[in-house]
Image (tube, helix red, strand yellow):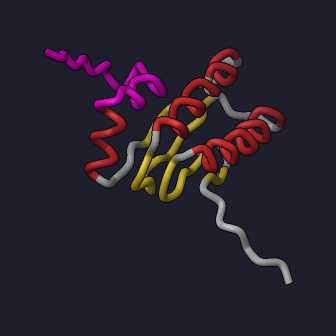
């Protein structure tokens, strides 16, 4: 009997949902999902749904953000649903991950250091 393996990223039509945490393992799964999306794409919009994410790490988020260039090159609009967890939601905003994913919807945060 095959054991079911937990998958941190799943595609539902033009929506890609992330679950629990975004790390290098999630990025690996994202690359598989985005490849499938681009091969069979009939959508002009991609929604990245991070609403179920409770933890996000730069070593997962930065590669995902960089991987979105190929989607943009195909003139596919990218939208972002932020995490519902307030701490993680603030992280997406203050690190500018939200802005880098969807600059038309999220403004750039400027942090001054002394």
* Residue 6 covered by magenta stretch: no
**Image coords of residue 24 (percent x, y):** 60, 44
Q: How many labels were placed on the picture?
A: 0
Question: Going 65% across and 66% down the picture, which residue do you hit?
Answer: 6
**Image coords of residue 9 (percent x, y):** 62, 52
**Image coords of residue 20 (percent x, y):** 48, 58
* Residue 95 covered by magenta stretch: yes
Q: Is residue 53 left or right of residue 60?
A: left
Q: Which is nearer the eye, 55 or 75?
A: 55
Q: Main secondary structure of the magenta part?
A: loop
**Image coords of residue 109 (percent x, y):** 27, 21
Compared to residue 21, the image places residue 46 above or below, namely above
Q: Residue furthest front?
A: 114
Compared to residue 16, the image places residue 113 above or below, namely above
| Quadrant of the rendered image containing residue 1 | bottom right
Compared to residue 18, the image places residue 79 above or below, namely above
Q: Is residue 30 left or right of residue 36?
A: left
Q: Residue furthest right?
A: 1
The magenta span reads 94-114
Question: Going 79% across and 41% down the picture, which residue do you hit?
Answer: 36
Question: Going 45% across and 25% down the picture, which residue do you hit?
Answer: 102
| Quadrant of the rendered image containing residue 40 | top right
Q: Which is nearer the eye, 42 or 93?
A: 93
Q: Is residue 70 left or right of residue 91?
A: right
Q: Which is nearer the eye, 52 or 60?
A: 60
**Quarter containing the C terminus:** top left
Q: Residue furthest left?
A: 114
Question: Going 60% across and 56% down the picture, which residue do you hit?
Answer: 8
């Amino acid at each position: 009997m095959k054991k079911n393996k937990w998958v941190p990223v799943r595609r539902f039509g033009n929506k890609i949902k992330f679950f629990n945490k975004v790390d290098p393992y999630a990025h690996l799964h994202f690359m598989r999902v985005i490849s499938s999306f681009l091969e069979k794409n009939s959508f002009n919009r991609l929604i990245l749904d991070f609403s179920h994410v409770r933890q996000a790490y730069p070593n997962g988020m930065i590669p995902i953000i960089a991987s979105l260039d190929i989607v943009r090159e195909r003139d596919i609009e990218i939208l972002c649903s932020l995490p519902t967890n307030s701490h993680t939601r603030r992280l997406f905003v203050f690190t500018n991950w939200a802005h880098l994913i969807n600059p038309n919807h999220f403004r750039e945060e400027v942090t001054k250091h002394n």
